[in-house]
Image: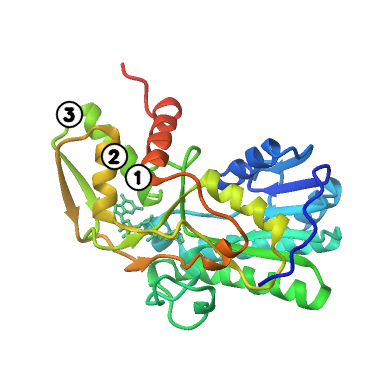
Amino acid sequence: MSASPPALDRSATVLVAGSSGLVGSAVIRRLEARGFTSVVGARSTDVDLTDARAALDYVASVRPAVVVDAAARVGGIAANDAEPVEFLNDNLRIQTNLFAAAHAADVDRLLFLGSSCIYPKHAPQPIPESALLTGPLEETNDAYAIAKIAGVTAVRSYRRQYGRRWICAMPTNVYGPGDTFHPARSHVLPALLQRFHEARVSGAEEVVVWGTGTPRREFIHVDDLAAACLHLLDHYDDPTPVNVGVGEDLSIAELAGLVAETVGFTGRIAWDTTRPDGTPRKLLDVSRLRGTGWRPAIGLPQGLRDTHRWYVENVAPAPS
Ligand code: GFB
């Protein structure tokens, strides 16, 4: 396994790119809870990372010792399928510019967040890190996946050519408070929470869920992912990306049942099989992560309740 680097200095300046997003905001909460005293969050309104000059100037002005790259254009299966050009180009630009700026500012520790969609569509299950680049990708998100694979290669290249102690984490599907709730663009878990909640409130008898219900997905709560990111920065220094998951998956049909139970919807579930299923199964092999001594703490039923509460308090329209 990897060499263990020195734990991060709690007074080091840590720059979290993508700090208004689901993952970036959770990483900031975790760093602050763990006693980091100089945490800087970069939102897209602070710096446009698709602009190379802006990225260089911004990182030079912050002078971070550590960078967490949680900045990305993200979305669910429909958004990825509809806008592959933006998912490819924006993500390539964001990470290329941020890495170049971090290198120019002599940043020695960086964590890049990828995605489990980098693995082949028919990878062995659970998916080991060694499955990378062993087969064709799922077509609905190949543009996003290629951008993330380029990011993994870039991190490995900065390590090899310049000796940077940069690392990659590959999270499974992430959810939690702060997620994007949009009927067409979001990932499945927030999309279903919103749809089932609205059906319960309006008294609808049926909720439509996309696809066949048979694909299997693994979900990690964003606070667990943030904890894993900090754990890896403190304990992991190796060119191999690390899968970050919980080690268990469920079918979309089972997820829909759990969401219905969480929000109190008791009507029918109908399946819109004109919608794509995407990858049949994405369960990560998390033995490398477990080998570093980390385990998740938040189970899916608890995480769903937290996320539903957050949705009701922050997103759902107030009852009139
Ligand atoms: O979360 P999701 O969009 O992402 O969809 P992926 C997961 C599964 O849920 C698919 C089904 O089989 C969908 O067909 N599903 C059912 C729904 N109802 C819905 C719904 O209302 N909304 C959505 N979004 N899905 C994404 C990638 O793939 O995963 C990204 O496109 C990224 O690139 C992300 O990697 C983690 O797991 O299929």
Front-most of residues 85 and 268: 268
Picture residue at 20% right of the left edge, 60% below the top: 273
User: Quick check: is the Cβ at mark 2 less than 8 Å away from ligand 1?
Assistant: yes
Q: Which mark is residue 203?
A: 3
Q: How many marks?
A: 3
N-terminal label among 2 and 3: 2
Question: For numbered disc 3, what is the local secondary structure?
Answer: loop
Q: Quadrant of ligand 1?
A: bottom left
Q: Are marks 2 and 1 in contact (CB under 8 Å)?
A: yes
Three-letter residue code for mark 3: Gly
User: Quick check: is the Cβ at mark 1 less than 8 Å away from ligand 1?
Assistant: yes
Q: Quadrant of residue 197?
A: top left
Q: Residues within 10 Å of mark 3 (few under 14, many from 20)?
A: few
Q: Which mark is residue 195?
A: 2
N-terminal label among 3 and 1: 1
Picture residue at 70% right of the left edge, 42% below the top: 41
Q: Position of residue 294 (x, y in %)?
A: 58, 55
Q: Residue furthest bottom?
A: 134
